[in-house]
Amino acid sequence: MAVVRDLRVLLRFRDFRRLLLVRLLSQGADGVYQVGLATYVVFSPEKQTSPAAIASAMAVLLLPYSLVGPFAGVLLDRWRRRQVLVYGNLLRALLAAVTAALVTAQVPDWLLYVSALCVTAVNRFVLAGLSAALPRVVDAERLVMANSLSPTAGTLAAVAGGGLAFVVRLVISDSDTAVVLLAAVLYLCALLASLRMAPGLLGPDLALVRPRLSDAVRGTARGLAGGVLHLAAPARREAARALGAMTLMRFCYGALTVLVLMLCRYAWSSDTDEGLALLGLAVGVSGAGFFAAAVVTPVAASRLGPVRWIVVCSAVAAALEPALGLSFARLPGLVAAFVLGFITQGAKIATDTVVQASVDDAFRGRIFSVYDVLFNVAFVGAAAVAALMLPPDGRSVALVVAVAVVYGAIALTLARFDPQ
């Protein structure tokens, strides 16, 4: 396979191997920590979980990625990136240990969220540092390949970490603290792996003259605003519509994610361990939908065009989501998880293609920063809306119908303006 061949080529670079190991350990720890926190909030037997608690947990896990992310590069251009990896993983290990202590002490949720918020904020710097360091460990000819494979490997590591957290929690009774401590251990392993690289290896070149921090922060904010204005130009309307559609589809996916969490917790099983196993199955099935979309979308989008493929995805969701979801039964719900994973990832791949093709290269990075903010804020906003609409057991006909209407509106709107 081409992917295996490309990875074999990259692994010949010793420093790339070391940086990749840091990424795998770091993102694997992220997966363990995030699933550990989420399952503690949702599936602890002593807790009466509410949609509002789930929405709060999602805000803690996702918002720092968007709000801190665009400005992380300002500081990463001033700090040695290897040191960011060392101290970032050390700080996350300590904060994860604090989280474990808070879980054991059964403190109020807001204290737990403060600790988790600090961990996820540091994550943004570590992930940005890992990406910024890639040009220092591979040659220019293989940089695109490395940019493609390294984040993908990190995502798979995060999924594997999440799976490990599910296994630990199902095998060990009262294991919430153990799961979070496992994340702390993995963060320490990432720290040790970082120490194998020389302090100056990953850059930046500190001899270069840089603007003052305040000027750089203001420049980043102006750059984001400039990206939005660039996207608003008539020539980029297709990209703007695709981004708007993807934001709404992410909103729908977020609302239905909270619904499935509540169904797993209360409607599909009265036993918390069985409910957790069902949630793990739903996540796996949705992940299979993501993988299927990665296989099908390149062919479908090349034949139909990316915008029409988004139309097809949203139309399918509008039809199948209520057909499968209104029964609120296990099997149709799991099928719906696959379908929603497929259409969400299929639409995202097509949206990425439209944005990359329509936006000027000088603005592309800023547009994708805006994209990242919209993507995560939509998911958190959906959780907040679901918290207002969902009953305790998750069975909400109004939410299922409203989401179907949004999907249908996306399909009709894009079909109307599709120039193809």
Image (spheres, helix red, strand yellow):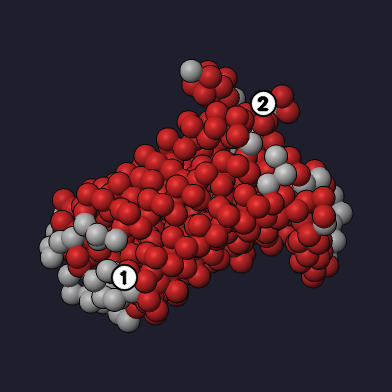
Q: Quadrant of the C terminus?
A: top right
Q: Residue at x 60, y 29 (%)?
A: 303
Q: Residues within 10 Å of mark 1 (few under 14, many from 20)?
A: some
Q: Residue at x 75, y 53 (%)?
A: 237
Q: Residue at x 50, y 70 (%)?
A: 381
* Residue 310 position in % (x across, y down): 57, 46
* Residue 375 position in % (x across, y down): 57, 58
For the residues labelled 1 and 2, the Cα–Cα distance comes to: 50 Å
Circle 1 — which element? Answer: loop
Question: What residue does disc 2 label?
Answer: 142
* Residue 200 position in % (x across, y down): 68, 43
Name the foreground residue: 40 vs 101: 40
* Residue 387 position in % (x across, y down): 38, 75
Occupied quadrant, residue 109: bottom left
Occupied quadrant, residue 147: top right
Query: Up-down: is 108 above or below 306?
Result: below
Circle 2 — which element? Answer: helix
Q: Which mark is residue 292?
A: none
Marks 1 and 2, the one that precedes in the sequence = 2
Q: Residues within 10 Å of mark 2 (few under 14, many from 20)?
A: few
Question: What residue does disc 1 label?
Answer: 396
Closer mark to the observer between disc 1 and disc 2: 1
Report the number of discs.
2
Q: Identity of the amino acid at label 2?
A: Arg
